[in-house]
Amino acid sequence: MRVAAIDCGTNSIRLLIADIVDDDEGARHLLDVTRQMRIVRLGQGVDATGMLAPEALERTFAALDEYAALIGAHGAQAVRFVATSATRDAGNRQAFMDGVQARLGVAPEVIEGSEEAELSFAGAVSVRPPADDEDILVVDLGGGSTEFVVGNAAGVRGAVSIDMGCVRYSERFLTDDPPTPAQIEAAEAEANRQIDSVLDALPIQDVDRVVGVAGTITTVTAHVLDLHSYQPEAIDGTELPIGVVEAAASEFLAFSRQRRAQLPYMHPGRVDVIAAGSLIYRTILLRVAQATGNRVRTAVASEHDILDGIALGLARP
């Protein structure tokens, strides 16, 4: 079955067209036909105004016009459009939803953070499922929110979504170029406060492995690997010591916008938000290490995430 999945977040809108196939043991897998991403910054200003900006809607609808053409050309049999943090927060989201319906012929689903978390977990473990005795923490670090999901081979044990993301923190805290020590300190303090609620709600102390997904985390990995271009196949599955991630985040925070823009693996749409994203990620990993008594010392980056979870969910029973 050929399906099309669209994930519309605060910073990017992504398309996956894939064939769903069953292996000899009955497990379902995705065979990619095409993956596309456009940085549209739908969440521009939402944290401050509570509304989707007209220019942000225009950028998003232009990307959707391209995606609609690809979906038709590749003959997808089912389409699902999922919108997350920015759209949940916007007072004028009906204009966005009407625009999506007009272009794709399907109603967009503005999902709650708990469902977003479950889809992220399903996608993240689709390639390397948990071992029978293993608890995994999936961290999906987006533009407006971050999802934390603890699960194992039996499924999801718990999930939390918090309003902590690279666009939101860039607009709220890291406004100078590069950010000042006071701005960094304020962002870290707020991140730690928000992570406190995650530690209260989820059994982080039981975690054996951390898998990080989404653009901030894969870009941090590309930086550590010193890639000459953005190479998903090199990034996917890379396991890094937490101290190495911490050092990479510190470098992004020290770089100017111009210096970040010169990095060959840096998408132009991430240049101004990667510092905040990497600060959030290093703070999360340091707290996870602390919560597990330093039993968890590394984190894995995955190119498989909520988009894969959306696509797999379209499979016929």
Image (tube, rainbow, N blue to C red):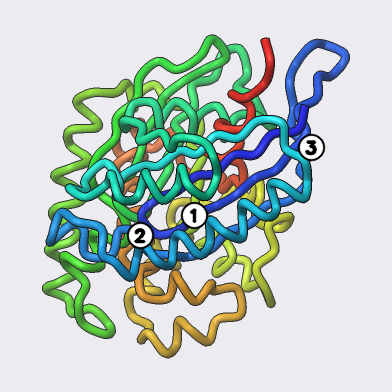
Residue 269: percent from the left, percent from the top? 45, 72
**Pointer 2 local density, CA inside 10 Å: few below 14, some 14–19, many at least 20:** many
- Location of residue 133 with respect to 87 vertically, above or below: above
Looking at this view, is 127 or 269 the one in front? 269
Q: Give the amino acid at mark 1.
A: Ile
Tell me what residue is drawn at x 62 percent, y 25 percent.
314
Residue type, label 3: Leu
**Residue indicated by mark 1:** 13
Q: Using the numbered discs, state the Cα–Cα distance from disc 1 to disc 3 in whole angstroms.
A: 20 Å
Q: Which residue is mark 3?
A: 31
Q: CA distance from mark 2 to mark 1?
A: 9 Å
Distance from label 3 to label 2 (Cα)? 29 Å
Which amino acid type corresponds to the residue marked 2 in the rendered image?
Leu
Please tell me in which quadrant of the rendered image residue 127 appears. top right
User: Do residues under tags 2 and 1 come within 8 Å of each other at their CB atoms?
Assistant: yes
Numbered label attached to residue 270 = none
Quarter that holds the C terminus: top right
**Label 2 belongs to which residue?**
42
* 72 vs 159: above or below: below
Q: Earlier in the sequence, mark 1 or mark 3?
A: 1
Crowd class of label 1 (few under 14; some 14 to 19; many from 20; radius 10 Å)? many
120 to the left or right of 146: right
Q: Is residue 228 or residue 142 the one in the foreground? A: 142
If you read the primary sequence from the N terminus, does the residue marked by circle 2 or circle 1 appear first?
A: 1
